[in-house]
Image (cartoon, coloured by chain):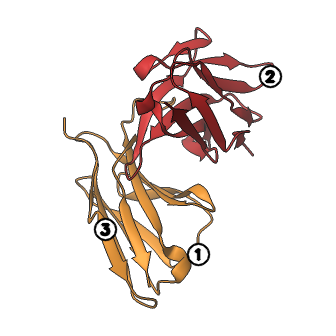
Chain colours: A red, B orange
Amino acid sequence: AQSVTQLDSQVPVFEEAPVELRCNYSSSVSVYLFWYVQYPNQGLQLLLKYLSGSTLVKGINGFEAEFNKSQTSFHLRKPSVHISDTAEYFCAVTMLSGGYQKVTFGTGTKLQVIP
Amino acid sequence: KAGVTQTPRYLIKTRGQQVTLSCSPISGHRSVSWYQQTPGQGLQFLFEYFSETQRNKGNFPGRFSGRQFSNSRSEMNVSTLELGDSALYLCASSPIAGVGADTQYFGPGTRLTVL
């Protein structure tokens, strides 16, 4: 069975400071990895995804993530955060099971950008 | 292309009632998934429909059911509502492009409150 662990439920960071949101997963098969952002009272929006190829993935809004197979991690980073980045971030893992995709989400990390 | 739409956006029901939520996927998307999001349990997968057939199901009681129509629109039904069913219900659609990972596109959700 696959699982996703987001180690930090809340991350406070000052504006213009760098941030890293951690995500670890476990799976016995190859996976595809995603980061989503959810703003208050809205649905989820895709930030970036890793399917294959380069382990460093760049997404929207200046975010990037690095896939580390040996550490089974997919941490999200941004070199300089803005107030508008205040939101909840979800890591997700997709694997193929029986020919169909199965998606598992982490519990989310609330990023609080402090002015 | 228009995004995923969900109706209604907000709903208030009382215990014991039933409710039907609707989701219209992005044009051309044939897969629709439903999720329940609560502060305590996070994002939990309910079920996925593809070509009018349920192909994946999460660990929810039989009170939760769904269906998909030939135009890929989907409905989710919850019967005999309980207080714990209060949640944000998210619908997500994805294109099918052979065997591989499909990005899910989320709607804004329906906020269900059970009194």
Dot in front, 3 or 1: 3
Q: Does dot 1 land on a helix, a strand or a loop?
A: loop
Q: Does dot 3 land on a helix, a strand or a loop?
A: strand
Residue B78: in sight, yes or no?
no
- Disc 3 and disc 2 on one polypeptide chain: no
Q: Amino acid at mark 1?
A: Pro
How packed mark 3 is, by other alpha carbons closer than 10 Å (few <14, some 14-19, many 20 or more), is few
Quadrant assignment, res B29: top left
Residue at numbered disc 2: A71
State the residue in front, B15 or B79.
B15
State the residue in front, A20 or B60.
A20
Labelled disc at residue A38: none
Q: Residue furthest top?
A: A54
Q: Is residue A19 above or below residue B85?
A: above
State the residue in front, A79 or B102.
A79
Q: Amino acid at mark 3?
A: Tyr
Q: Amino acid at mark 2?
A: Gln
Residue at numbered disc 1: B61
Quadrant assignment, res B23: bottom left
Residue A68: x and y in percent read: 72, 18
How packed mark 1 is, by other alpha carbons closer than 10 Å (few <14, some 14-19, many 20 or more), is few
Q: Is residue A9 left or right of residue B90?
A: right
Q: Is residue A115 above or below residue A98?
A: above
What whole-number distance in Å separates the C-alpha atoms at marks 2 and 1? 36 Å
Residue at numbered disc 3: B10
Residue B16: in sight, yes or no?
yes
Subunit that carries the residue with mark 1: B
For the N terminus of chain B, the image quarter is: top left
Dot in front, 3 or 2: 3
How many numbered badges does the structure rendering display?
3
Q: Residue furthest left?
A: B1
